[in-house]
Amino acid sequence: MSRVTLLALQILVAIVCIVLWQLLSTVPIFGKILLPPFFFSNPVDVFEQIVKWFWSGVIWKHLWITLVESILAFVIGSLGGVLVGFWFARQPLVAAVFDPYVKMVNALPRVVLAPIFALWLGLGIWSKVALGVTLVFFIVFFNVYQGVKEVSRTVLDNGRMLGMSEGQLMRHVYWPSALSWMFSSLHTSVGFAVVGAVVGEYLGSAAGLGYLIQQAEGVFDVAGVFAGMFVLSAFVILIDFGVTLVERRLLVWRPTVDGRG
Amino acid sequence: MTTPTAVALEDAKVAFRLGDGRVYTAVEQAHLSVGQGEFVAIVGPTGCGKSTLLNVAAGLLKPAAGSVKIFDRPLAGLNRDAGYLFQADALFPWKTALDNVAIGLEIRGTPRAEALPRAQKWLTSVGLGAFANRYPHMLSGGQRKRVALAQVLIRDPKILLMDEPFGPLDAQTRQVMGNLLLDLWNADRKAVLFVTHDLEEAIALADRVVIMSAGPSSRIIGDWRVQLARPRDIFEVRLDKEFHALHREIWGVLKDEVMKGYAQSTQAAEAV
């Protein structure tokens, strides 16, 4: 299938959904409106709300806050994940001792931590960053840990036979291997950084996309809730696109899925 | 006083402790020496421990008994005089062909600016001058072996250890690689210990062919000198009458071991 046809079909899906939504929420069928506007709003209103946000410029501040929170959560969580992942992988005893605790914390639904973070760090951006960090950290940590542990035995032996010291093995073998594992989970970890930020905002804040959605919900402004959701989706897609670009640059050495680069 | 022997295994025994606590003896009382400038091939049936023996010479494995001497000095730790060519892909997948070759020098502290042109020269001499910027996954199996060969040779090791290096390649590529190896080896005649299961390859390349019995507890059961003239061409040498005579002679011994090894491996499979 050509790119153009594919794109046309993808757009068609959106159009069909939006038209159906508009019809079912405004035109009565057998004397009944299937999607009551109070609960479902309608595309025109939602679109109007989005335009209003961008026209007046209020949305930029919220987008900016959410972006900053996501980036901070991603950077701090990744840094911690890489360091601890490396440490655990190189020190099996430490890993064994901490294993049950790591599993325990990871099993905890992170949302329940939000109130504690809000209590400790206030309603500013840091409580959201902290929530994002707890999500990102574990993804990066597990991947780096795996990456260091599963370095090919042959490649390692080859490094040794070429005369690498422990430090050089670290730099030329363990580190690139761990990084490649970390980058393979880049989409997931960036996505979780955004989730952490938005959920944190939703549960208590004064700015951000989550706050915007929560505010609209508080006054039963369904159009506002949907508008917030759409802006959020577009925001995530843009970030994901950015990640794809970074990934392509950094993982040139990796075979693509179809086996040919 | 003669020149020192490059690699000398004296009564080397290699054993592994199995998961259930039993001890598996892979190689028993191996006695093997490789002189300076000598090309020795070890041939044996699958699972006879020939790679194990090579790892002992490399210092990657410690013998349970016996001694390993490198240039008449007992080997402690890794064998720093040896370059090792692995059977599986051992290139660093995140480095380009050029960086993969240059790394051997960079580890030693050679500045990058100096290492890169030398690496490029080595890539050219293994016929990959135009592929310097490719990553390993963009190269064919044969090309990767060429890079691996350059990676090892750029460090100019005194001893070359090769573990079925051309095993994963197709028959033609294998012969081409064999000729390339002989050409490069002819330039400075390093001591080579070459492990293979292919008797023809062994005779065509080596000065001496050593045969091992089927494992476990395999031992060296034969040692033949190959008198074919050098420099050799692998394609030509296989048509030589002498080659055929030697092949028949060694195969007479090897065949029984191959059958034994085969029988054991199928029995083991059935037991599982």
Image (cartoon, coloured by chain):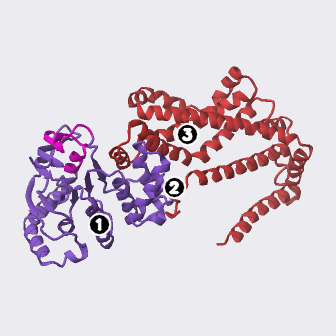
Chain colours: A red, B purple
Name the kind of residue labelled 2 in the image.
Answer: Trp
Mark 3 or 2, which is nearer the eye? 2
Number of numbered discs visible in the structure rendering: 3
Q: Is residue B250 within the magenta segment?
A: no
Mark 1 or 2, which is nearer the eye? 1
Q: Residue at x 18, y 54 (%)?
A: B268
Q: Are marks 1 and 2 on the same chain?
A: no
Report the residue marked by disc 3: A139
- Mark 3 Cα shell of 10 Å, populated few (<14), some (14-19), many (≥20): many
Q: Chain of mark 3?
A: A
Report the residue marked by disc 1: B183
Indicate which disc residue A253 carries: 2
- Mark 1 Cα shell of 10 Å, populated few (<14), some (14-19), many (≥20): some
Q: Where does the magenta region start and end?
A: B52-77
> Is residue A19 placed above or below A46 in the rendered structure?
below
Q: Residue at x 29, y 50 (%)?
A: B157
